[in-house]
Amino acid sequence: MIISAIEAVDFESVLLSVAGNDPFACRIISLYNSYNAELAFVDYWLVNADETGECKGAVARNGTNFIVYLSDDSVNEEVSAFIRVAGASSVLCDDKFELDLYGGTSVSGFVLERSEPIENDDNIEFGDTDIKAVYDLLVKCTDDNFTPPAFDEFYVDVNHKIRHNAIRIASINSNDGLAAVAMTVAESSNAAVLGAVACDPEYRKHGYGSAVVRHLTNALIDEGKTVYLHRAENANANFYANLGFKEIGRWKEYYFGG
């Protein structure tokens, strides 16, 4: 049984009680706290057991992009059928739960976790971050694993989520912009998902990328949050291993249409 968040009683608390600090639930909760369920471009649903009404999963829609949290007790056939008729262009979920979504393509990678502070003796000043400067650095560091959206879309979304405490940015300044940046792409009360980590090619091999990740990760852990990131299959394995992040599972993202 799939219930709209508008009809559900305390969507966030129910999901937290079931999912704990799961990174996919964190993404859903962060979006929920950023954009009200009554807005036209987002939707949120609980996946409840027919017999008991207990929550077993959740789904979020942002435009045509979907995020799915599933548990061992979820009825995945029901979730698959629901998404197939919902007009999804992408679906992000835990790779251990098989969804039957027909056609399209998929990519997958590793879910990494860190819950203890990282030893840090960096003597580096971290600056206030201008969103345009962050975007410029991300564009400069674009690769096969990440292509930033158009600037206007990026600015509006990031600025809005920062104001709602749903994401944050850490950076190291250079003489003419940013040397390195890291940001969360989602935060809940007990978890955070790191993303968009970048270091200017001119400043690599100086430890700035590691420093900015340590700084942001430790700030989140100090607040009692478990820190996750979704690493691409063949990207940055040694970088995150050296920072003490552990592989705990895999993510999968399905893509449909052109």
Image (cartoon, rainbow, N blue to C red):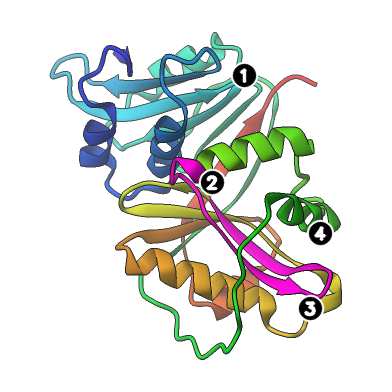
Q: Name the mark nearer the viewer: 2 or 4.
A: 4
The region drawn magenta spans 162-184
- The residue labelled by disc 4 is 141
Q: Position of residue 134 (x, y in %)?
A: 71, 55
Q: What is the number of the mark on residue 204?
A: 3
At label 1, the amino acid type is Tyr
Q: Nearer the viewer, residue 56 or 148?
A: 148
Binning the other alpha carbons within 10 Å of mark 1 as few (below 14), some (14 to 19) or many (20 upward) gives few
At label 4, the amino acid type is Cys
* Mark-to-mark CA distance, 1 and 4: 34 Å
The answer to which image quadrant residue 136 occupies is bottom right
Residue located 48% across and 86% down the image = 120
- The residue labelled by disc 2 is 251
Please, what secondary structure does the residue beneath circle 2 have?
Answer: strand
- The residue labelled by disc 1 is 102
- The secondary structure that dominates the magenta segment is strand
* Mark-to-mark CA distance, 2 and 3: 28 Å
Q: Name the mark nearer the viewer: 3 or 1.
A: 3
Marked residue nearer the N-terminal end (2 or 4) = 4
Residue located 52% across and 46% down the image = 162
* Mark-to-mark CA distance, 3 and 1: 42 Å
In contact (CB < 8 Å): disc 4 and disc 3: no
